[in-house]
Amino acid sequence: MQKRMSLIGSLCCSIERLWQNFRSPYHRNYSLFDILFLLLYFLEQFFLIYSLAKYPSKFPFIVGIFALLVITTVSIQKTMLDSKNKAIKESYMELVVNYNSLYNEYEHVTSLEYDTEKAKKK
């Protein structure tokens, strides 16, 4: 049992490293990946039309494979878009925290300046 868990654990670690290595280029090139997905959808549809023209007798099998390919592609794209949305949300939250910090510092400095000016007038 212990050996099986360590195999599963090492597999999970390998998958995580693979995703981290893939995630960085994806977040730097959103538009490129959008275009690649459009190209992939085009190729899937081309495959469907070509296959149906060449093998009309295998219509149910070809349509089934096409449906599996499209569903898989959509699922992968959704996962990647969720990752994109998460990264954007994290960036937004970081900006909000930085803004609030700067605003509080500004308020503190202006109140000090106001107090200093008030003391000079006395």
Image: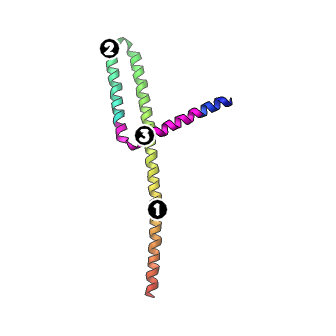
Position of residue 12 measured from the top left corner of the image (x, y, whole percent): 56, 34
Position of residue 14 measured from the top left corner of the image (x, y, whole percent): 54, 34
Do callouts 3 and 1 mark residues in contact (Cβ within 8 Å)?
A: no
Q: Which residue is mark 2?
A: 54
Circle 1: residue type: Asn
Circle 3: residue type: Leu
Give how far apart the Cα atoms at labels 3 and 1 are: 28 Å
Which residue is drawn at the image coordinates 41% and 25% (left, top)?
Answer: 69
Q: Count residues near mark 3 (Cα–Cα under 10 Å), then give few for <14, some for 14-19, many for 20+.
A: some
Residue lying at the far right of the rendered structure: 1
Q: Is residue 31 magenta?
A: yes
Which residue is drawn at the image coordinates 43% and 43% (left, top)?
Answer: 84
Q: Count residues near mark 2 (Cα–Cα under 10 Å), then give few for <14, some for 14-19, many for 20+.
A: few
Q: Is residue 51 magenta?
A: no
Q: Earlier in the sequence, mark 3 or mark 1?
A: 3
Do callouts 2 and 1 mark residues in contact (Cβ within 8 Å)?
A: no
Give how far apart the Cα atoms at labels 2 and 1 are: 63 Å
Which residue is drawn at the image coordinates 47% and 68% (left, top)?
Answer: 105
Q: Which residue is mark 1?
A: 100
> The N terminus is located in which quarter?
top right
Circle 2: residue type: Lys
Main SS class of the magenta portion in the image: helix
